[in-house]
């Protein structure tokens, strides 16, 4: 999941009923987005088996979700500015639901309907993600306190519900088509109904509009030449690759690598998502207490240990324990990396854009890379490439140190 942080309000405010209503609607948007994604992801093994796809072929199929999102992201700002967050989320929820339905109906007929459906799914998800984050930033300003991390925890709650629902559908023998069609109808009906009546009419945070402009303005593209920004982007890429690997390949890796029953894959995936949910809900408290760098470095280390348990644990219970640690350790990486890029409000837009662009390449490159490696060494062993990236993330976490602290240190010297 991506995050678009804004400057925190200067002082607490008394939220209006409209803000509280928008807060509830934003939670619904995040939860529904996670539910839609996990509903698809929980049936990847079943669809893989029906298509008789090799790991490399499945990797290319999964790539279509990232391609759809990457096409949508450059257009998302225009869409949200022109139509507003509520209509953007409503329309993209329908687009995502259509993609789910196309996959559910089309997969018995071959790969190409799945490719088309996943592209629509990714396109809807990309713009939906940007729009609900913009709305979340506006709600945060109205509440006078940080809530974006918990909105992202809401996404994880939805993904856990979707994964558990998928596990239940597998255990009960419900066909993939019926499952994905039901999920599509639920998303297409609930999300527009809630957000069109609940989102705020104005979604551009006032703090951004009133930011100080005493420094000489810089073109956003100049951020591509800043070493700190590029290294934060590399850190985010490492963590995004890990999160994407867990989402796309964990169920398949456990099911194949441990010769586990079909229900074990979705349940392990659900464990991963539940742990990530807890990490996103409680993680901000750890950052406040121990600092950003220590929290991120520890998180990446925990994720690395969890991944090694999954790959080399040898028995299914240890792999499940590893999935839990992987989820906890991965939770903060992407959103807090974005926050680090936005430390200077005047230059936040360009820096967040750079970091997001670098980070999203992980979702583009990750699925096919794991798939091609899986053809040669098996999917479970292919996950070791993620361990190397997590080790790099441990080293790069120091680059997220707040700019304020760095400036004070320099001033003192």
Image (tube, helix red, strand yellow):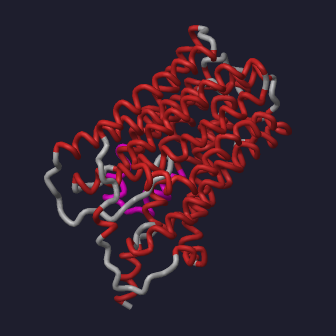
Name the residue located 27 percent from the left edge and 57 percent from the top edge: 141
- Image coords of residue 116 (percent x, y): 70, 34
Report whether residue 251 is seen.
yes
Name the residue located 59 percent from the left edge and 43 percent from the top edge: 123
Which corner quadrant of the image does residue 99 belong to? top right
Which corner quadrant of the image does residue 318 belong to? top right
Q: Is residue 347 above or below residue 19?
A: below
As drawn, which residue projects farthest toward the right? 376
Q: Give the total of numbered labels.
A: 0
Report whether residue 333 is seen.
no
Determine if the magenta segment contains residue 234.
no
Q: Nearer the viewer, residue 214 or 405?
A: 214
Q: Nearer the viewer, residue 289 or 359?
A: 359
Determine if the magenta segment contains residue 289.
yes
- Image coords of residue 190 (percent x, y): 40, 27
Q: Say whether residue 8 is left or right of residue 237.
A: left
Q: Quadrant of the C terminus?
A: bottom left
> Is the magenta region chiefly helix, strand or loop?
helix
Q: Say whether residue 134 is left or right of residue 225.
A: left
As drawn, which residue projects farthest toward the top? 172
Q: Say whether residue 51 is left or right of residue 320.
A: right
* Magenta residues (range): 281-301
- Image coords of residue 292 (percent x, y): 41, 62
Q: Nearer the viewer, residue 188 or 53?
A: 188
């Amino acid at each position: 999941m991506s995050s678009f942080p804004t400057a925190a309000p200067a002082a607490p405010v008394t939220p209006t009923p409209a803000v509280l209503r928008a807060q509830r609607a934003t939670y619904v948007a995040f939860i529904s987005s996670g539910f839609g994604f996990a509903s698809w992801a929980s049936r990847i093994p079943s669809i893989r088996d029906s298509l008789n796809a090799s790991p490399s072929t499945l990797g290319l199929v999964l790539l279509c979700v990232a391609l759809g999102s990457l096409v949508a992201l450059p257009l998302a700002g225009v869409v949200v500015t022109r139509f507003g967050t509520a209509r953007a989320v409503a329309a993209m929820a329908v687009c995502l639901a259509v993609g789910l339905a196309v996959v559910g109906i089309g997969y018995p007929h071959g790969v190409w309907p799945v490719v088309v459906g996943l592209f629509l799914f990714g396109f809807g998800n990309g713009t939906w993600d940007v729009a609900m984050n913009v709305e979340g930033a506006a709600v945060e300003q109205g509440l006078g306190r940080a809530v974006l991390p918990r909105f992202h925890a809401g996404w994880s709650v939805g993904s856990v519900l979707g994964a558990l629902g998928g596990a239940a559908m597998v255990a009960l023998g419900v066909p993939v088509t019926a499952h994905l069609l039901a999920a599509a109808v639920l998303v297409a009906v609930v999300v527009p109904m809630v957000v069109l009546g609940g989102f705020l009419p104005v979604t551009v945070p006032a703090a951004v509009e009133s930011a100080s402009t005493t420094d000489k303005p810089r073109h956003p593209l100049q951020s591509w030449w800043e070493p700190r920004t590029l290294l934060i982007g590399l850190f985010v890429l490492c963590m995004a690759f890990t999160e994407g690997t867990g989402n796309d390949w964990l169920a398949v890796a456990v099911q194949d690598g441990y010769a586990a029953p079909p229900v074990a894959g979705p349940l392990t995936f659900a464990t991963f998502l539940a742990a990530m949910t807890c990490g996103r809900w409680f993680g901000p408290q750890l950052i406040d207490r121990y600092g950003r760098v220590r929290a991120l470095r520890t998180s990446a280390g925990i994720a690395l240990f969890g991944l090694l348990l999954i790959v080399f644990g040898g028995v299914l219970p240890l792999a499940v324990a590893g999935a839990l640690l992987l989820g906890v350790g991965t939770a903060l990486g992407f959103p807090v990396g974005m926050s680090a890029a936005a430390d200077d409000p005047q230059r936040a837009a360009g820096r967040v854009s750079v970091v997001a662009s670098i980070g999203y390449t992980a979702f583009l490159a990750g699925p096919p890379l794991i798939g091609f490696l899986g053809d040669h060494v098996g999917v479970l062993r292919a996950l070791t490439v993620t361990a190397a990236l997590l080790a790099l993330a441990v080293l790069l976490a120091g680059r997220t140190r707040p700019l304020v602290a760095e400036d004070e240190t320099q001033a003192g010297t």
